[in-house]
Image (cartoon, rainbow, N blue to C red):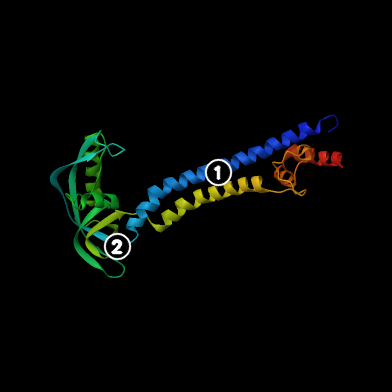
């Protein structure tokens, strides 16, 4: 370490600390962004469908109604893109583990389709691609999968409304799984940033102080954060020089 200025040695180690701070900021930003996105995609829909319970559905009738449903295919909900799809309706009987049973309930592929179609044509499947031909193909696939008499499959029902059943819902497990990892990333990132910003070294001065001694000697936090590679040896040598 002879001949190497202490300021140059310390500058190398401080860069590594800045990298760690940068990682903390990135983790916090990614976690916050994902929390917002997953909150809109999963948590918000879950709030409206958390009352649904599992059941077993059996198809009683599936047929095209003859109606053609017009829909908006623009992602922003504007009328800049209009398309259409054929209306296919499925009636099912269902039973729950508690013994609740109902007949001739309308099946919907999702809770979103239920909210759109419940007060309209009551179509079981909703697909609004820009190309109408793709919508026809998607409806046909749905009809082949759930529209034949006697087919049985898992579904979700409202115990207070026996008129409908839903195939797919957002479950508690999905919400927990989608929110845990972004939250962990956010907390970890914030912890790194807060430790860096609010740490007080052994001399009672903050890491960001402009004191001349702090510019030449690393703080206790910095000594802990840079215990990797040659930087550990550099700091050890510098401490001996300081003594």
The residue at 60%/49% (across/down) is 191
* Residue shown at 13% from the left, 44% from the top: 67
Question: Residue 18's x, y, as percent?
Answer: 65, 38
Which residue bears the numbered disc 1? 27
Mark 2, secondary structure of its residue = strand
Which secondary structure lies at badge 1?
helix
Q: Residues within 10 Å of mark 1 (few under 14, many from 20)?
A: many
**233 lies left or right of 30:** right
The percent position of residue 46, horizontal first and vertical second, equals: 36, 55
Q: Look at 59% across and 43% down and name the residue there.
A: 24
Could you say which is closer to the camera, residue 17 or residue 153? 17
In depth, the one of 187 and 168 nearer the eye is 187
- How far apart in space, not on screen, are marks 1 and 2 (Cα)? 40 Å
Is 134 placed above or below 56 here? above
* Image coordinates for residue 185, horizontal then vertical, percent: 54, 47
Q: Earlier in the sequence, mark 1 or mark 2?
A: 1
Q: Where is residue 101 in the image (x, y as percent from the top left)?
A: 23, 67
Task: Report the residue that reaches farthest toward the top.
Answer: 3
What residue does disc 2 label? 55
- Which residue is located at x 22 percent, y 63 percent? 162
């Amino acid at each position: 370490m002879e001949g190497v200025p202490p300021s140059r040695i310390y500058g190398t180690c401080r860069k590594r600390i800045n990298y760690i701070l940068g990682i903390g900021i990135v983790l916090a930003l990614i976690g916050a962004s994902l929390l917002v996105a997953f909150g809109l995609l999963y948590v918000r829909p879950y709030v409206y469908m958390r009352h649904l319970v599992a059941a077993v559905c059996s198809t009683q009738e599936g047929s095209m109604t003859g109606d053609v449903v017009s829909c908006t295919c623009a992602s922003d909900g504007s009328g800049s893109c209009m398309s259409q799809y054929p209306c296919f309706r499925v009636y099912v009987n269902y039973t729950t583990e508690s013994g609740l049973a109902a007949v001739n309930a309308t099946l919907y592929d999702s809770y979103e389709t239920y909210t759109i179609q419940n007060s309209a044509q009551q179509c079981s499947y909703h697909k609004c691609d820009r190309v109408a031909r793709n919508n026809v193909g998607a409806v046909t696939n749905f009809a082949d999968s759930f529209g034949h008499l006697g087919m049985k499959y898992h579904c979700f029902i409202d115990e207070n409304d026996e008129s409908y059943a839903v195939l797919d819902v957002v479950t508690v497990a999905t919400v927990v799984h989608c929110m845990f990892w972004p939250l962990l990333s956010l907390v970890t990132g914030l912890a790194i940033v807060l430790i860096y910003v609010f740490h007080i070294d052994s001399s009672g001065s903050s890491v960001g102080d402009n004191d001349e001694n702090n510019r030449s000697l690393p703080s206790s936090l910095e000594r802990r954060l840079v215990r990797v590679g040659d930087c550990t040896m550099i700091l050890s040598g510098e401490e001996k020089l300081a003594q």
